Image (tube, rainbow, N blue to C red):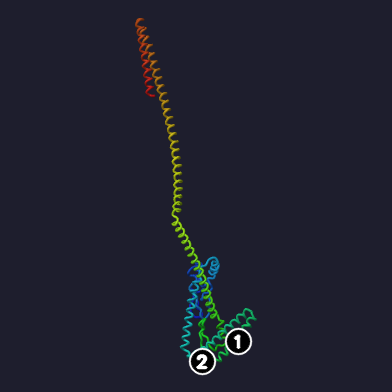
Amino acid sequence: MPAYFNLQGSVRKAPHSPSRDTTRQRIKFSDDRVCKSHLLNCCPHDVLSGTRMDLGECLKVHDLALRADYEIASKEQDFFFELDAMDHLQSFIADCDRRTEVAKKRLAETQEEISAEVAAKAERVHELNEEIGKLLAKVEQLGAEGNVEESQKVMDEVEKARAKKREAEEVYRNSMPASSFQQQKLRVCEVCSAYLGLHDNDRRLADHFGGKLHLGFIEIREKLEELKRVVAEKQEKRNQERLKRREEREREEREKLRRSRSHSKNPKRSRSREHRRHRSRSVSRERKRRTRSKSREKRHRHRSRSSSRSRSRSHQRSRHSSRDRSRERSKRRSSKERFRDQDLASRDRDRSSRDRSPRDRDRKDKKRSYESANGRSEDRRSSEEREAGEI
């Protein structure tokens, strides 16, 4: 992977390496790998880039496209990234303040000890130097913007501060021996922990207080105070909403408790209500049961009627058919027997006519007629008995 060296000589990864570009394409601004301070435009790695205290590339992802996405989405939803950024800046400023205290201790060990009165006079000179340096940096900024009148007013303030500085230096010089006064007295900047000299000229002070390092630390500290204020407001708002929800729940619980107590105080009313409800339910159930039983009875009655009608019809049909069949059989039998008797009688007559006398012939005829008459009556009787039995 390509790399380059910064001014301190530390190795840094190339900001536009292919691997980081593919990573940026895969993630969203809400991912944990994205720097939340960068989304809020206050990451120390960006602010102090190119200065004497360049921190190198941030370990988390920095991408302007992700910042733009966050700015659009934050208008509709609060992601509370201010808390993460505040923690990041607090740790960075705490480290800077720790270095400042270490530098102060080192100066106290190397430089000659002076009395408290002389130290206060020297501190006054340092304060005026800082004021002059800030005013000169402001003059340069106004001049670059083209605001000449305002820069001229600031220059007047610079001249007044210089006059005060000369007086403070005179007071400080009179309070110390000449040998000790000529020695360079250093001081640590409370903002960026850089060293400042008591006898630095205006140009040196302007370069320091108007430089990117000092202004970057001022920006980080101001942003930290702003984040603290925003986080406190949001926490207060969230606490109020939480307290409001809790009060609503408590009010609902009190209302339920009051209703339950009112029911317990009037048991007769509650019992009568319950009785009416139970009665109405039982009445409705009884009505439904009756309607269902009536419908079942109607269906059963209809089915029984239809079945009885079908059975009677089938029985009548069977009776008529049996009668018809018996009559047909009796008719066939009687006709056959009659034809047979007639045939036999004719044959006997022929024989008797040929063989016997007329008297015998008459006797035989009478006898045959009598037998045929008896046979017909018996046939009729048997047929009537069969019909009666079938019926």
Query: What is the residue that sits farthest to the right in this orientation?
Result: 149
Q: Secondary structure at mark 2?
A: loop
Q: What amino acid is labelled 1 in the image?
A: Lys
- Vertical order, 368 against 152 (above or below): above
Image-based side of 332 in relation to 143, left or right: left
Q: Does residue 71 show up? A: yes
- Measured from the top left, where is residue 374 in percent x and y? 36, 14
The residues bearing labels 2 and 1 have C-alpha atoms spaced at a distance of 26 Å
Dot 1: within a 10 Å radius of its alpha carbon, few (fewer than 14), some, or many (20 or more) residues?
few
Residue at which label 1 appears? 160
Q: Earlier in the sequence, mark 2 or mark 1?
A: 1
Q: Nearer the viewer, residue 136 or 279?
A: 279
Residue at 35% from the left image edge and 12% from the top image edge: 371
- Measured from the top left, where is residue 20 in percent x and y? 50, 70
Q: Secondary structure at mark 1?
A: helix
- Measured from the top left, where is residue 322 in percent x and y? 40, 25
Q: Nearer the viewer, residue 143 or 1?
A: 143
- Vertical order, 340 against 228 (above or below): above
Dot 2: within a 10 Å radius of its alpha carbon, few (fewer than 14), some, or many (20 or more) residues?
few
Residue at which label 2 appears? 183
Q: Quadrant of residue 174?
A: bottom right
The C terminus is located in which quarter?
Answer: top left
- Measured from the top left, where is residue 35 in percent x and y? 50, 71
Numbered-mark total: 2
Q: Nearer the viewer, mark 2 or mark 1?
A: 1
Q: Nearer the viewer, residue 78 or 19?
A: 78
Q: Quadrant of residue 150?
A: bottom right
Query: What is the residue that sits farthest to the bottom in this orientation?
Result: 178
In the rendered structure, find residue 128 and report the number of the disc placed on it: none
Q: Does residue 61 show up? A: no
Circles 2 and 1, Cβ within 8 Å, touching? The answer is no
